[in-house]
Image: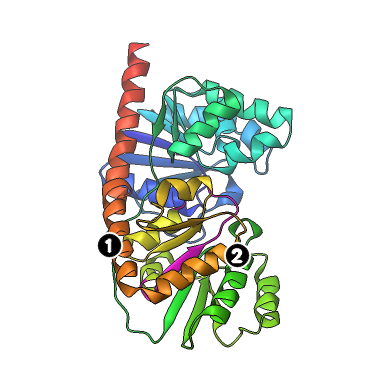
Amino acid sequence: MKIAFVSAASSSHTVKWVNALCKKGHKVRLYSLPEHENRQKNLNPEVEVVYLGKSGFAGYFLNGSELRRDLADFAPDIINAHYASGYGTLARMAKVHPLVLSVWGSDVYEFPLKSPLHKLLVAGNLKAADIVASTSEVMAEQVRRVFGEKRKIWITPFGVDCSLFSPQPQEHDGFCVGAVKALEDVYGMDDLIRAFALFVQKAPEGSYTLNIYGKGSRESELQRLIDSLGIAQCANLCGVIPNTKVPLALSEMDVVCLPSRSESFGVSAVEAMACCVPVIASNVDGFIETVEDGVTGYLAPVGDVEALAEHLLTLRQDAELRRNMGTSGRERVLRLFDFKKNVEQMEQVYRVAIDEHKAF
């Protein structure tokens, strides 16, 4: 089918979707604001990319006519806008159908809470869509709760490539705790550092390492925290790595710890589980859906550093438990979050939207 994708070309999530759809033989044209240019050059060359003329927040409103004209030329079978606030607005301004609107997270968790006008904008975008899709059940419930959405919300998980994210056992000394996450306040890397420091104090004598991969605005502050806690010799901010190298980094960890303060889905946990690594995570919406507490890892209350440290101690002391949780985690990913299956789920949503639009 011919698919028009309305989303940020700079987003790794966008790239993953359009590349996968193109690989399956669909003709894909991606529409993006110019400031969201794909500078990584990691789009499939067969994906057509159109950067619209107007930039900034106003571009979501002002590019509607241009988008509509180009779509008339492309004549897609389906339009899929990703992110209910910005690009959802752009698709609504273009007045195009059949339209699938995919919600991502902050667009329904944070943006609508800024003001009644923000909420009204997203509500209008949802209403303009023929079908609403969500990455997770909990996010779908958020849409129902905040906007009173009565229609069926289709679940299209954002899983992982299970051939890339697979166990790659690495020999290493001691016990390694880690995370692959942006260094921003919402992801709670400061809580991870404090929990690791407490864990080291309580653990038997041994070799312990914390490796955090990622970049962000809190990097300097996190390094100061590491220094102040006296763990600079074993806690490392390793910088950002390409997604293709993440599986190797994860496979060097005995436990992945993700104490986020908010998560709409939790793909970082899914990636770790796919690599057979047990996960300790906060009990926020996204991780409640991805991590099975006591089976593939543990969930801890948000901000509870002592609980995180205790779970680390439990897993440090029981290698068999780690192996069992790791195996269960990969089985769960293969069952629910294999991206190949997720793409098939998205294709089914497209077909339903097309059929319903024809019937209407």
- Report whether 282 appears left or right of 114: left
Could you tell me the amino acid type at mark 2?
Val
Quarter holding the C terminus?
Answer: top left
Residue lying at 40% horizontally and 45% vertically, measured from the top left: 48
The tag on residue 310 is: none
Task: Report crowding for label 2: few under 14, some 14 to 19, many 20 or more residues within 10 A (C-alpha).
Answer: many
Residue in front for this viewpoint, 153 or 39 = 153
Q: Which residue is mark 1?
A: 327
Task: Report crowding for label 1: few under 14, some 14 to 19, many 20 or more residues within 10 A (C-alpha).
Answer: many
Residue lying at 33% horizontally and 12% vertically, measured from the top left: 359
Could you tell me the amino acid type at mark 1?
Thr
In this rendering, is residue 97 above or below 140?
above
The boundaries of the magenta stretch are 251-266
Give the mark count: 2
Q: Which residue is mark 2?
A: 305
- Report whether 35 appears left or right of 115: left
